[in-house]
Image: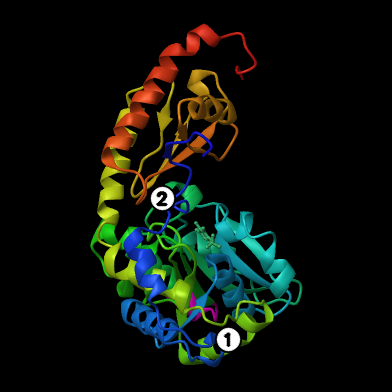
Amino acid sequence: MNGISIDLYSDTITKPTPEMRKFMSEAEVGDEQQKEDPTVNALVQKVCELLEKEDAIFLPSGTMCNQVAFRVHCRPGDEILMDETAHARHYETGGPSALSGACIYPIQGKRGVFSPTQMEEALRPENNHFPRSRVVLVEQTSNLGGGTIWPIETIRNICITAHHRGLACHMDGARLLNAVVATGLTAAAYCLPFDSVWIDFSKGLGAPVGAALAGSREFIREAWRWKHQFGGAMRQAGIIAAGALYALHHNVERIAEDHENARILARGLAEIEGIDVEPIETNLIFFDVSGLHLTAQAFNDLLMERGVRVSILGKTRCRAVTHLDVSRSQVQEALKNIRALCKDLPKRKGGVLEL
Ligand SMILES: *Cc1c(COP(=O)(O)O)cnc(C)c1O
């Protein structure tokens, strides 16, 4: 392969294990569009129990979960409130405007989390000049914010105010289960005040494909229309739903290991002069390399020569992610390589790598 032996690029890079593949290969299947795929139906049921919602829908990606939910909640000209760092704002190719005609109000939270007061200030007054505030989005955990966990009290207060003002509350729960494992609170407790919520199976859970969006029966009935329109209605999807089902049974509690590995990695990085590590709460470790006089790109290029990859999320900001496919010893190995890289740096000064 590309010479990368320790890949901290993202928790999306995990590959299905032989056990997961075996379970997938034996899945009972049917026509998903007709709701006749028993494995998809079992997954939907399991998600409803986990999140304590009336109904759910299986979709190919988390992006489609966000976009289908926006399409159900919004009419053209409506506004969706979200933190300025939100995935739906930066990484979904303008989906809210393209698919729902909705605009985004970016709120300047702290590490991806805004306060109930900030949300209240962002709400539009009743006036024909303004877009209509229609949805508030909470990203649990916040990705670009730093793997930050939204405190449950903050969530509750935001949703109370939002509902009072007639908004729908939507949770992007791509990494909700990371928050659950880190805090010991249940997924259902986090989901309770939301009208729509989704979880991703292809991130920390280690399944190859899929996400599930949940809500009331009525919400899911509408979501089915847009699943079809956006091309997300499938056929024998039980093959991939089986990976998700397997992941929910086997890969949730073990997320604690990813969090422990993240703490070890963060601690090690913090000891290196020139690397500035942001606080960590879950499996995402953000750090700045400007103190090494390197861009994030240059840092990663050098690191890849040593078989380790991180991702680049700013001029000098990097992200390392721990997941199912990095072990404790690989984390230690990665740290060793980063230390060695930093020690060798002075020899390379004067090259194109300096800021
Ligand atoms: C990855 C991610 C998504 C999109 O999920 P995909 O399954 O990659 O489409 C949405 N929101 C957040 C916070 C994410 O990290």
Instruction: Measuring from the top left, give residue 41's x and y in whole percent.
Output: 42, 86
Tell me the element at label 1: helix
Q: Main secondary structure of the magenta part?
A: helix
Q: What residue does disc 1 label? A: 224
Q: What colour-coding does the image apply?
A: rainbow
Q: Which residues lie in the magenta part?
A: 160-167
At a point 39% along the width and 57% down the height, the residue shown is 204
Secondary structure beneath label 2: loop
Question: Residue type at mark 1?
Answer: Trp
Residue 167 position, x and y percent, is 55, 78
> Depth check: 324 or 174 in front?
324
Q: Is residue 164 magenta?
A: yes
Between residue 59 and residue 79, name the one nearer to us.
59
Q: Is residue 3 left or right of residue 38?
A: right
136 relative to 323, above or below: below
Q: Nearer the viewer, residue 174 or 166?
A: 174
| Alpha carbon separation for disc pair 1 and 2 | 31 Å
Q: Name the residue type under label 2.
A: Gly
Q: Quadrant of residue 98?
A: bottom right
Residue 197 appearing in the image: no
Q: Earlier in the sequence, mark 1 or mark 2?
A: 2
Q: Would you say 132 lies left or right of 296 here? A: right
Residue at 57% in and 84% down: 223
Q: Is residue 295 left or right of 143 when viewed as pictured?
A: right
Q: Give the residue number, with chain letter if any, for mark 2.
A: 147
Q: Is residue 299 above or below residue 262?
A: above
Q: Is residue 278 above or below residue 62?
A: above
